[in-house]
């Protein structure tokens, strides 16, 4: 941005305003999953009509992202000083005469000398007699106007009219959020609740907070001063109702009702929606052996044990309260009651962003009473022009220690050209890349699946 010399001077000589470190009232935050925060706030400073300057202590921010929220205000130029250390305080003192404490008297003001700061890197000081030294003549006493207690933004602005406050938007770092779901499995129906956990390194009072879920394309972030996080402790939810959801662009926005106060090191949790119910199903799944791309692998003649995974599916039918919810990516914890009615954690899983009407499938551990082994019984290849064609035979043996019969799904998944040539149970083609076999395993019994595949690469 081009800034005229007059504007630069006006910004440089603006009178400092000692704002507190906490973000005051009339603050709005949009928090992204990656730790980026869009701040919208009203700064209580008088703005005159025409060209004026303001010096604001807003904390760490990306100065290139600052913009005016009022259409009648134009940001003409800015400078951002984020250096709060002594070395940069001395840099600001170049050309000024400072007092230096030279003794250890109880009244330091009586044991001082004065010297003019000539330059830094290296530091040079001109004594009253004109001589220049390269060492500090004592402990410097800095005027308060040279010392920054936090990063400071100096703005040159042009306003169409006088205003009692300056409304600004900008990006900073220091807060993020993640979704967490609790799923209590009942007889045919599950009770689902979702919360957003907001860990913060910011201090903000009475803010309107929104959480944005989705993949937002952005340029590389500007490095900002590191924020020290204290030991994290959990604060109780302060919102009195679940968040209100709306679609914006190709993302989803969750507005937390009321106002939140965030503190450094404190994690605040809020409900994303009212608890809802949904039908659920459990499936036992053995993943296939085909690699997704590349040549079909040849394995030895040793039979290897493979896990029988437990998958839970939450049904999300359209036009139902739970089915219409967009679910942000997050962690799911699944609970089931024991014979005494006590809830027990039986699995944990993760799922990405789930659109309305889309089922949630949650792989959540392995079955205890089901075992599976796999064997590649044959393997052959031949060349056809520029292609390689391979065929292989597989056997999957399933054993159950359960008191009732169960169905186990064997899923083969591969991209490109491939097909199932034959199988001992029907092959269900779920998509161009996924094929499923459903095998009924009797109580305390065994079942065997055999199939042949053809793969081209």
Image (spheres, helix red, strand yellow):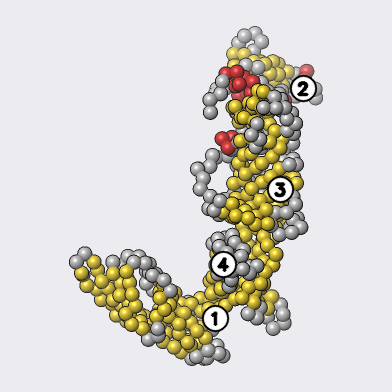
10 or 371: nearer the viewer? 10
Residue marked by disc 2: 108
Sequence order check, earlier mark of 1 and 3: 3
Instruction: Calculate the distance from the C-alpha at mark 4 to the C-alpha at mark 2.
Output: 74 Å
Q: Residue furthest top?
A: 129
Q: Distance between the residues labelled 4 and 1?
A: 32 Å
Q: Quadrant of residue 47?
A: top right
Q: For numbered disc 2, what is the local secondary structure?
A: helix
User: Mark 3 or mark 4: which comes first in sequence?
Assistant: 3
Residue 96 visible to the viewer = yes
Nearest to N terminus: mark 3 or mark 2: 2
438 relative to 55 in the view: left or right: left
Q: Mark 4 points at which residue?
A: 357
Which residue is under mark 1?
368
Dot 3 lies on which element?
strand
Q: Residue furthest right?
A: 106
List x then y, in percent, for residue 207: 72, 46
**Front of the two marks 3 and 2:** 3
Who's the residue at 63% across and 73% down the image? 278
x and y percentages locating residue 280 in the rendered image = 59, 76
Name the spot of residue 161 as percent of width and height, x first: 70, 27
> Which residue lies at the image location 47% right of the left edge and 87% below the top edge?
440
Give the alpha-carbon distance from disc 1 to disc 3, as whole Å: 48 Å
Secondary structure category for the residue under label 1:
loop
Give the mark toward the camera: 1 or 3. 3
Q: Residue 208 carries which label?
A: 3
Q: Is residue 405 above or below residue 316?
A: below
């Amino acid at each position: 941005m081009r800034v005229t010399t007059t504007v630069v001077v006006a910004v440089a000589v603006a009178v400092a305003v000692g704002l507190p470190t906490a973000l005051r009232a009339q603050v709005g935050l949009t928090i992204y999953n990656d730790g980026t925060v869009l701040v919208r706030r009203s700064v209580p400073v008088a703005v005159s009509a025409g060209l004026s300057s303001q010096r604001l202590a807003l904390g760490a921010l990306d100065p290139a992202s600052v913009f005016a929220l009022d259409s009648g205000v134009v940001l003409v130029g800015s400078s951002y000083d984020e250096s709060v250390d002594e070395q940069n305080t001395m840099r600001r003192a170049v050309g000024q005469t400072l007092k230096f404490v030279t003794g250890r008297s109880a009244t330091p003001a009586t044991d001082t000398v004065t010297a003019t700061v000539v330059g830094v890197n290296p530091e040079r000081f001109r004594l009253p007699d004109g001589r220049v030294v390269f060492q500090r003549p004592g402990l410097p006493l800095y005027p308060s106007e040279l010392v920054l207690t936090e990063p400071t933004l100096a703005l040159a602005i042009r306003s169409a009219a006088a205003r009692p406050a300056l409304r600004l938007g900008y990006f900073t770092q220091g807060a993020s959020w993640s979704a967490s779901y609790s799923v209590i499995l009942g007889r045919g129906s599950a009770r689902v609740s979702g919360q957003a956990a907001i860990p913060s390194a910011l201090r903000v009072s009475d803010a309107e907070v929104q959480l944005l879920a989705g993949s937002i394309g952005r340029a590389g972030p500007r490095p900002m001063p590191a924020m020290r996080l204290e030991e994290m402790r959990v604060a109780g939810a302060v919102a009195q109702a679940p968040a209100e959801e709306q679609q914006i662009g190709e993302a989803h926005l969750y507005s937390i009702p009321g106002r939140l106060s965030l503190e450094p090191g404190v994690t605040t949790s809020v409900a994303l929606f009212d608890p809802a119910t949904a039908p659920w199903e459990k499936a036992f799944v053995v993943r296939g052996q085909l690699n997704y791309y590349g040549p079909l692998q040849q394995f030895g003649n040793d039979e290897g044990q493979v896990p029988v995974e437990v998958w839970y599916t939450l049904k999300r039918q359209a036009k139902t309260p739970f089915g219409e919810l967009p679910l942000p990516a997050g962690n799911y914890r699944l609970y089931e009651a024991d014979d005494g009615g006590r809830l027990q954690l039986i699995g944990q899983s993760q799922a990405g962003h789930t659109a309305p009407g889309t089922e949630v499938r949650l792989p959540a551990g392995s079955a205890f009473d089901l075992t599976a082994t796999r064997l590649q019984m044959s393997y052959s290849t031949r060349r056809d022009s520029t292609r390689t064609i391979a065929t292989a035979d597989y056997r999957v043996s399933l054993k159950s220690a359960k008191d009732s019969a169960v169905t186990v799904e064997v899923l083969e998944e591969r991209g490109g050209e491939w097909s199932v040539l034959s199988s001992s149970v029907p092959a269900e083609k779920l998509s161009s890349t996924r094929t499923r076999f459903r095998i009924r395993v009797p109580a305390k019994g065994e079942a065997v699946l055999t199939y042949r595949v053809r793969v081209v690469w």
